[in-house]
């Protein structure tokens, strides 16, 4: 079961659990197959590499800034873990844009890499889903129950929960490692390889039971949590903004008010992150429901072109979501921008200082050499023949 970041079937790669790209494409007419080919070319060979590369760089910057000592907070622990998962998801996705099981002229290692890369992309994508849920619930507790938040929303507990989320995602994604196998065949003295489903992956109990458990746990349940808690947060931020506006009319401004304003900016940023997450992931849910309906009514083959093309576009939206958090953090958080500037300005100063110290050392050594030469010359003139004869012995 190849899935996207939300745990939905990766329809861009497989139309059915046991049907590969080449087989599914053969069911299409020549015209529709050409449309699918163009879509895959534009999305997988052009847009995804550009967006994924930018996203990898952006997530690396997120990790550097969020791990800074001045950014230490429980929320930033979740955001750091999310940046790591998004970065790894993008790396595997970018790799899978160029390596496919249906490409014959590639080394054996590439065939072994593809099934594992798909599972790892699912693993980090699924972890990102529940990390988003985790920091949404954490922000809800901090905003709506501040006294409890001081006890529950700590850096240590955020680290433990992040590791726990990864562990749960690993357990639920682990069966995917046994879905596919590499089959080696010989023909006319040449060896060829192919990716095929195992008997375990083809079993009806697995394909139905695990499929629906997977979709429920990594799609529908997280969506419900995100919708409910994000709605409460939006209502809370709206009330706080209204209250601050009323206080500003009476010129009531203080240190506590500024701190609350900064906290509400962080909450607004996290709400925006979740909303964009939902908007980018929701098309996958709609497509899944539509695909399930078609499959139940034996209409999937007739709509396969639409499903595959839509799947490519939905996959692109998921990658855009995993790539855009750096822009959101930079736009909403002044603290993130200040820390980013200090971190990279410090590196620049260190680089300049190291270059300057090297230049100063070179100049000092030249000056010292010149002074030594002058002193030696003076010494020679005073000590006369004895000094020169001593030099000749060395």
Image (cartoon, helix red, strand yellow):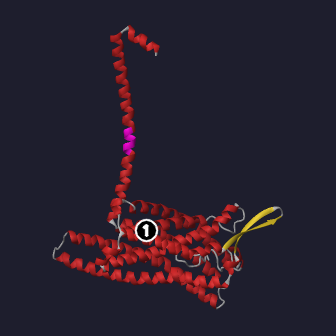
Left or right relative to 122: residue 357: left
Q: Is residue 165 visible?
A: yes
Specify the principal SS of the magenta part: helix
Q: Is residue 313 visible?
A: no
User: Who's the residue at 25% across and 80% down the image?
Assistant: 242
- For this orientation, the residue located farthest to the left is 250
Q: Is residue 234 above or below residue 111?
A: below
Residue assigned mark 1: 325
The N terminus sits in image quarter: bottom right
Image coords of residue 3 (percent x, y): 58, 76
Image coords of residue 11 (percent x, y): 61, 77
The front one of 203 and 7 is 203
Determine whether the residue tagged by mark 1 lies in a helix, strand or loop: helix
Q: Is residue 225 above or below residue 192?
A: below
Image coords of residue 263 (percent x, y): 30, 72
Start-end of magenta stretch = 352-357
Left or right relative to 233: residue 277: right
User: Who's the residue at 84% across and 63% down the image?
Assistant: 188
User: Who's the residue at 73% across and 66% down the image?
Assistant: 193
Displayed quadrant of residue 41: bottom right
Left or right relative to 110: residue 343: left
């Amino acid at each position: 079961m190849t899935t996207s970041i939300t745990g939905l079937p990766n329809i861009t790669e497989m139309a059915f659990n046991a049907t590969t790209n080449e087989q599914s494409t053969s069911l299409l007419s020549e015209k529709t197959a050409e449309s699918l080919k163009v879509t895959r070319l534009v999305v997988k060979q052009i847009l995804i590499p550009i967006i994924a590369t930018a996203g990898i760089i952006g997530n690396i910057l997120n990790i550097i800034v969020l791990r800074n000592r001045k950014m230490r907070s429980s929320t930033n622990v979740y955001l750091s873990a999310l940046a790591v998962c998004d970065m790894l998801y993008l790396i595997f996705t970018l790799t899978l844009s160029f390596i496919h099981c249906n490409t014959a002229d590639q080394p054996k290692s590439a065939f072994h890499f593809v099934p594992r890369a798909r599972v790892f992309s699912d693993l980090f994508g699924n972890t990102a889903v529940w990390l988003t849920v985790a920091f949404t619930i954490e922000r809800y507790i901090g905003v709506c129950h501040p006294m409890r938040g001081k006890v529950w929303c700590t850096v240590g507990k955020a680290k433990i929960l992040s590791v726990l989320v990864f562990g749960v995602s690993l357990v639920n994604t682990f069966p995917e490692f046994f879905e596919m196998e590499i089959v080696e065949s010989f023909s006319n003295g040449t060896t060829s390889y192919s990716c095929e489903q195992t008997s375990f992956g083809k079993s009806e109990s697995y394909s139905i039971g695990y499929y629906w458990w997977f979709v429920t746990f990594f799609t529908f349940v997280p969506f419900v949590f995100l919708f409910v808690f994000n709605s409460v947060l939006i209502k809370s931020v709206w009330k706080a903004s209204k209250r601050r506006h009323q206080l500003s009319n009476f010129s009531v401004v203080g240190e506590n008010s500024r701190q609350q304003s900064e906290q509400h900016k962080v909450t607004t940023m996290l709400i925006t992150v979740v909303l964009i997450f939902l908007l980018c992931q929701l098309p996958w849910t709609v497509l899944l429901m539509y695909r399930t309906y078609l499959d139940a009514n034996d209409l999937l083959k007739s709509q396969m072109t639409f499903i595959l093309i839509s799947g490519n576009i939905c996959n692109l939206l998921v990658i855009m979501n995993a790539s855009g958090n750096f822009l959101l953090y930079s736009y909403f958080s002044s603290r993130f921008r200040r820390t980013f500037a200090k971190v990279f300005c410090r590196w620049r100063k260190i680089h300049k200082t190291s270059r300057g110290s090297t230049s100063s050392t070179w100049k000092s050594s030249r000056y010292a050499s010149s002074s030594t030469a002058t002193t030696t010359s003076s010494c020679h003139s005073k000590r006369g023949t004895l000094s020169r004869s001593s030099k000749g012995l060395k």
